[in-house]
Image (cartoon, grey):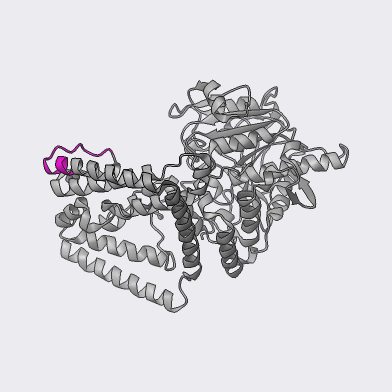
Amino acid sequence: MTNVQEQSELMARISQGWQALLAQYAQGGADFSQDMARVSAIWMRCFQEGFQLWQNRGNEFQNQWQTWQNQWQERLQAALSGQAEPSGDKRFKSESWNQPYFTLLRESYLLYAEQMFKALQPKSRSEAEHTEALRFFTRQAINAFAPSNFALSNPEVWGEAQRTGGTSLLRGIAQFVEDLVRGGGRLNITMTDMNAFKTGENVATTPGAVVYQNDLIQLIQYTPTTEKVYKRPLLIVPPWINKFYILDLRAKNSFVRWAVEQGHTVFLISWVNPGPAHADNGFEDYLQEGTLTAIEQIEKLTGEKEVNAVGYCLGGTLLSCTLAYLTAQEKQSKGKKKNPIARATYLATLIDFSEPGEIGVYIDEQQLDLLDAQMQKEGVFSGKQMATAFNSLRENDLIWSYWVNNYLLGKTPMAFDLLYWNCDATNLPAKMHAFYLRNMYLNNKLAEPGGITLLDTPIDIGSIETPVYFLSTEQDHIALWTATYRGARLHKGPVRFVLGGSGHIAGVINPDGSEKYGYRTHGELPEDPILWHAESEAHTGSWWRDWNDWVTEGCKANVAARQIEKAIEPAPGSYVRVKT
């Protein structure tokens, strides 16, 4: 295809996309009023924090400004003389940034950013708490205005436009308009080829079947691959913020497939992707119709009265509530209702929310009031909005790199299964999400004995005597490991705390046999997590084998493999296929 032909086709795509976008707006389109109200609340909070910081450290900022001017003069001279060092920042890795003008632009920006981040570095714990939003949104603004993010100030964009005769710019505009259309008026950045993957075909492929379903869950049982299995079945409770198949992405890194191969009878909850009809589903429903029902069904299907359970992220938070509820029920019945969970595993799970990480900047009374109003109107919290919030925690990697690649350079994102999963968003029911944010993130009620009541039962994590395994990851930006450590110490029974390498996803999905990330263990749980880390023992390889040794301690796989007897439909089921 010639450049002229491609440009003609691109102009047609842009025109069609623009017409579709106008039609969306004419039919109501995206309502930005709540978005603007929340943005106003955020900036008001930042202004208040900034004003207070200036009052406390104004003289220091003035001195720092003078230092910045002196350093800028030095970098200016280095840039003009061609002696500036290449930047280690991957946004500016191209050789084209070493041209004199662009070197000056790059160095001026990097120095300004460096000085701003240094100025806002907190000097005490109190200052850190009271400037959290200011620091976070200042970082968002600084990274948004990087010269790499604009066509006129990015030499790579100029070079690609010249090489393609302007076709790259038209490709970028076409993709930008189409992503706006796909997002219903909000920009929904394409991170990967969404047509390259299909659940059940090249992701979520472990053989099994849906053996039970209700309005909230499908319960999947996986086909055994060993002649003998462990007596206790294994229930996996994934988060419903994302879809379950992060645990069954590909054969070589599927935790589900690996657990089946170890001789576990694996059951997994696949959550519904809720719509407005699920608006009144609360956290109690996820307990009653989710974990409790799944345990009951497993007993009916296998005849076993005990299970081992694994909860990931929000699924782990629900698992902790399930354990506390079952413990309370056992005590109230004076032992007649035995807790059916023999051993529990938490993967990257918050139970004590006193240190929520940067996501906490989106959670305060005013923002939650605005969010409640939006959810009451729509019935759900949109998975796309949730994805945007989490992507902003790593904005350069998950927002601006795609902005430059897709829209400025006009390139098509490569096919990547992990990013396909990341973009396969789920909604959250209004009632459940409001309860979760207020009671856990905002008020940290789950960490308090009796702070939360579920199904008329006060929940006390400190009452849990069930042996638990905590897997946290050192670079997790969603569930900070020091915060998950506090949750581990709340438990009354024996706790094995393990710290994996990497982050919230890669540190968990680190298959057996991989030497990429190691993990750390310690026989004690001192109050200070930093002391735990200093005294812990480092291990190579994956935590999966360590977990399997723990969960099967004293047991042998000596039960005949349990075959699937009644199937509603093949795995991965229909609930996981529903798109937002």
Percent x, y of residue 120 = 41, 45
Look at the picture and state if 179 lies above or below 200: below
Residue 153 in sight in this render: yes
Closer-to-camera residue (571/462): 462
Closer-to-camera residue (532/520): 532
Look at the picture and state if 247 lies above or below 408: above
Q: Residue furthest front?
A: 59
Q: Residue furthest left?
A: 81
By secondary structure, the bulk of the magenta-drawn segment is best described as: loop
Total labels drawn: 0
Q: Residue at x 21, y 38 (%)?
A: 86
Residue 441 located left or right of residue 233? left
User: Is 85 included in the stretch rendered in magenta?
Assistant: yes
Q: Residue at x 71, y 29 (%)?
A: 559
Give the position of the N terminus as an image quadrant.
Answer: bottom left
Percent x, y of residue 246 = 51, 44
Residue 423 located left or right of residue 11? right
Percent x, y of residue 433 = 61, 57
Closer-to-camera residue (538/179): 538
Quadrant housing residue 532 = top right
Q: Residue at x 18, y 55 (%)?
A: 158
**Residue span colored magenta:** 76-88
Quadrant housing residue 75 = top left
Residue 288 located left or right of residue 480? right
User: Is 41 included in the stretch rendered in magenta?
Assistant: no
Percent x, y of residue 568 = 65, 53
Residue 420 in sight in this render: no
Q: Residue at x 26, y 48 (%)?
A: 109
Look at the picture and state if 19 lies above or below 208: below
Residue 229 located left or right of residue 93? right
